Amino acid sequence: KIDFITMVCPEGYPVDRPVLSKNLNTNIDEIYLRPPEFFDDLEIEVLLKKKVSQIDPTAKTVTIGGEVIKYDDVIVATGGKPIRPPFPGVNLKNVITIRNVPDNLMLKEVAKPGKKVVIVGASFIGMEVASSLARKNLDVTVIAMEDVPFERVLGKQIGGCFLPLVEKKNVKFIGGAKVAQIKGTAGTSSDPARATGVELGDGRVVSADFVVLGTGVLPETSIVEGVEKLRDRSIPVAECLSCPQAPGLWAVGDIASVVHGEGHRRIEHWCVAMNMGRHAARNIARNTQEPFRDVPFFWTAIFGKQLRYVGHATDYDDTIIEGDLSKMVFVAAYCKGDQVKAVVTMGRDPVAAAAAELMRGDKFPRKQDLTSGWSSRLLNN
């Protein structure tokens, strides 16, 4: 039985964070996950615009400002902090990261038709912002170390099918490039220095009225003391999502590295984070240690084309594709040896749902069974 719940929200009430990059036309008031009445009805104490400065797992205390609060259990769901790469000019005023509501509002303020924007990074945040801004008639350029969009996650073959689409929508894509610096004005006390362009490693300069960084995140775990973290700053947790080093401490979302095989697995997906939060809460409420076994899932939308990704494949040696990449209607299986680690679909949403269900029951076919027509057969299993 849980007698009392306190939720600390430094940014205000929780919002549907993916919308911040996927749809710039959304009214902020419409993306709160729950209305204030929801928390009132459940008698949950919500501390808005408050920051936790320290979590001490040994003393089982949380420090908020000058106040120290005792806990029986604490769920740490602080998420990721956007990375600002170490090249000159990265902290100029109009260099924006997309993480919270103020970031979204700042982007809306500067995103006027005809303005030039350079987006650094071709992962999901970067490409979603590119799609949103291009539809608002901005002059959009994406600069990426990869040759094609989404290459790090989807691979060159599938990522490559997005390149004609973004170029058709007048997004300039500069792949295989490195940023040397963000150039800007000198700035004065009344007019802070602003970015005016991005200089590449080969000396080219792409002019910009503002710059958006889509260069990844790092786990925000600095407030948690007394716990040995992994190299990426994440907190290692058991399958049940509790931290073996600190009884009563649970980590979920981007900051949690869940024991997996002989190592740990950390997944930066919104749906996974929400489900982890629910799972940790159930374990606390029921005083159980049930393992978290949800199948990872995420989706993205670029110029109206939606992609579904089920599973997790950071390490794969083959990709089996059924369908037409040029028409962006296909199913792809990412394999390691004979095991299918992940499935990606475009224009075949029911297959993604079927794949998730089969993976959940450990019944997904092996690679050798993926013969002609395999994606349609998944719907019949």
Image: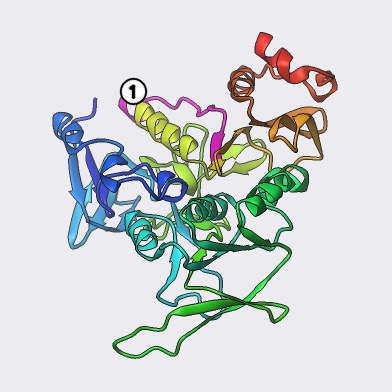
From this view, report whether residue 268 is shown above or below residue 11. Answer: above
Question: In this rendering, does residue 147 appear at all?
Answer: yes
Q: Quadrant of the C terminus?
A: top right
Element type at marker 1?
A: helix
Answer whether residue 4 is magenta in the image: no
Describe residue 13's horizontal placement relative to residue 141 as left or right. Answer: left
Describe residue 303's horizontal placement relative to residue 150 as left or right. Answer: left
Q: Which residue is mark 1?
A: 286
Query: Based on the displayed image, in which of its 4 quarters is residue 246 positioned?
Result: top left
Q: Nearer the viewer, residue 75 or 156?
A: 156
Give the x, y percent position of residue 205: 63, 79
From this view, report whether residue 374 is shown above or below residue 33. Answer: above
Q: Quadrant of the N terminus?
A: top left
Q: Nearer the viewer, residue 352 or 117?
A: 117
**Residue type for callout 1:** Arg
Answer whether residue 296 is magenta in the image: yes
Query: Based on the displayed image, in which of its 4 quarters is residue 280 positioned?
Result: top left
Query: Based on the displayed image, in which of its 4 quarters is residue 320 positioned?
Result: top right
Give the x, y percent position of residue 273: 45, 39
Q: Nearer the viewer, residue 111 or 88?
A: 111
Extreme residue in the top direction: 380
Give the x, y percent position of residue 329: 69, 30
Question: In this rendering, does residue 381 appear at all?
Answer: no
Describe residue 98's horizontal placement relative to residue 4 as left or right. Answer: right
The magenta stretch spans which residues?
284-300
Q: Residue at x 60, y 51 (%)?
A: 169
Give the x, y percent position of residue 162: 68, 46
